[in-house]
Amino acid sequence: MASPATTQTVRPLDGLHLDSSGPLELTGLVAEHLRLLGARTEPEPAASNHVRSVPGARSPRNPRSAQIALTGDGFGPQEARVTWADPSSGITDEATVQAATGIMAVHGRRDGEPRGLAVDYATTAAAVLTVQGLLAGLLGQARGGPAARVATSADRAGLLSVSQYLAATGADEGEAAELAAGGPPFTAGDGTLFELETLDPGAWAAFWRALDAPADAIRAGWRPFQFRYATACAPFPQALHATTRAQSWQRIRQAASVSGAEVCPLRTLAERAAEHDGGAPWSLTSHAEGSRPPASPPTVVRPLTGLTVLEAGRRIQAPLAAHLLGRLGADVIRIEPPGGDPLRGMPPACSGVSARWLALNRGKGAVEVDITSSQGRRRVRDLAAGADVFLHNWAPGKAAQLGLDRDDLAEVNPVLVYAYTSGWAERLPGAPMGTDFMVQARTGVGEAVRPAGEPPAPSLMTLLDVMGGLLGTEAVLAGLLLRERTGQGVRVDSSLLGAADVLTAPALRRAATGGSARRPAGFRRPLRTADGWIAPADACAAAAGAYDLRDLHTAEALAQLREHGLTATAVTTDLADLHHDPRFADSISRDTHGAPAVPDPWSFT
């Protein structure tokens, strides 16, 4: 088909009509993002407009499935279906998805036992993935491909969110740091809870020496602290916690200032709600018009076939975004430093390659470029001249310093989609280092992920890096579709701040209206059995908690709850068990290195 376009298009979905049906848990955020991208809907009752339902609440319509459709402006119908999971799995809501996919196990490592996230993490991820699928389908149509129907599910979103941790279970060696309870935040003498961040072992040591911490505790603490992003726990010596409790907050801030480390007090949801600017989680800015050579036509199952993504990413956020674009069919080429990405060697390894690195980067091409040299920067410009997307997550200002910012690359490729996935998107002046745990601390996520009655604590599962990567993919797809409809290059910006605001949106709304921002005490706490744990569905949790299941085996406990009409599922406590878990029949595969690999989060037909 000819590329659908209108001369008035300023957003990628302008001129398209949105219809959705099904429970708001599954459709609310999808519709919200599609509207932000320009889709229009019929007026809705004021009471339900932009409102996402309470976790566990039942819709009068089918509670297990939702339908979304975009039509109009020359496009064939683009439809999506989103579900919780296969109906035979017993997975029926956010709580049971978290339990089955291993989210509770990973999030609970800091506490030494599985814990549910008090935010709807899997549902939010599934919504963003659904938007991705719809955008990819429309992009495929705009490039001459057939209309396709996309399906997503919350359980596949959950598997994707733990894919790095799952990959490590198939490694040829053990973890580089101990998997045991413990970790930040720290507490100052006046009770201030705070996060500490540094990527430099010298700054780590200097910070603690300034507070007179024991030398052996400083040495022993660095490795678990350094690897907490990989292990989701940090069992460093209790002497470090004792050190901060003996100091004033002022002295702790002074120690950070002189050492080069950074500290950030945990903000409340009420504080974040008061300063929230209501901005979208990404921004799209069109720039110069141009032309580009024709690409290979897309296919139904791989709508980005023929497109090239040039990625200069590190750690998780940008590499995950590019990884998903690759799974949609794009050719992804990584720019790595001379000698290759050092994270390729991060333990544990599968066949000599980091299992966690493979989870984000398998299947990508790579070129080694010294971007600090003028010759290397020319090489990047040459590569960008033939690419459709340039994606990076460099530190703020680095692209401009290198002469590789949007305007620089637009000189060689006017229709490039230039994508920057950052920490703060320059929306919070004076913000600390834009890493996952610092953004969690600054935005109230540490309060949102734990129910009332528990001290706030950012999750050591990389919640925002993963969600930020998902939003980065969504933004790039929106940018590509906008480019296809207008013929203009596009800059897209996404951030961990945007990820935090999307994840905590229901809690921020409650806080802004004076309600209780946090979920009630005991929310999503699994129940012990004789040989493991079970997690009731949110709607059944209060009734299930009345039964003493500690002397029953897990299968017996589940059967007893079913006899009383209650829904629950077993909690995955060892991610290695997902390989043969009947709830995910044949879903987990292995790559050529032997590392476990999760399935694509969408399917196109």
Image (cartoon, rainbow, N blue to C red):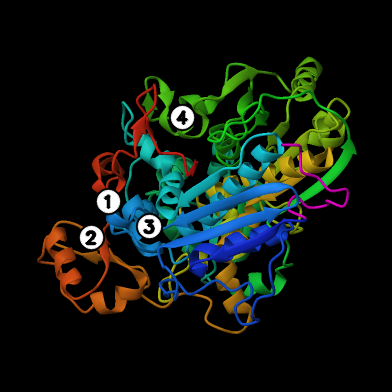
Q: Amino acid at mark 4?
A: Leu
Q: Amino acid at mark 3?
A: Gln
Marks 2 and 1 sit apart, C-alpha to C-alpha, by 8 Å
Q: Label 1, on which residue?
A: 573
Q: Residue at x 31, y 74 (%)?
A: 541
* Residue in the foreground of this view, choosing between 30 and 202: 30
Q: Label 3, on which residue?
A: 98
Helix, strand or loop at mark 2 = strand
Marks 4 and 2 sit apart, C-alpha to C-alpha, by 30 Å
Q: Quadrant of residue 534?
A: bottom left
Q: Is residue 242 left or right of residue 148?
A: left
Q: Is residue 274 left or right of residue 177?
A: right
Marks 1 and 4 sit apart, C-alpha to C-alpha, by 23 Å
Q: Which mark is residue 533?
A: 2
Q: Quadrant of residue 439?
A: bottom right
Q: Which mark is residue 358?
A: 4
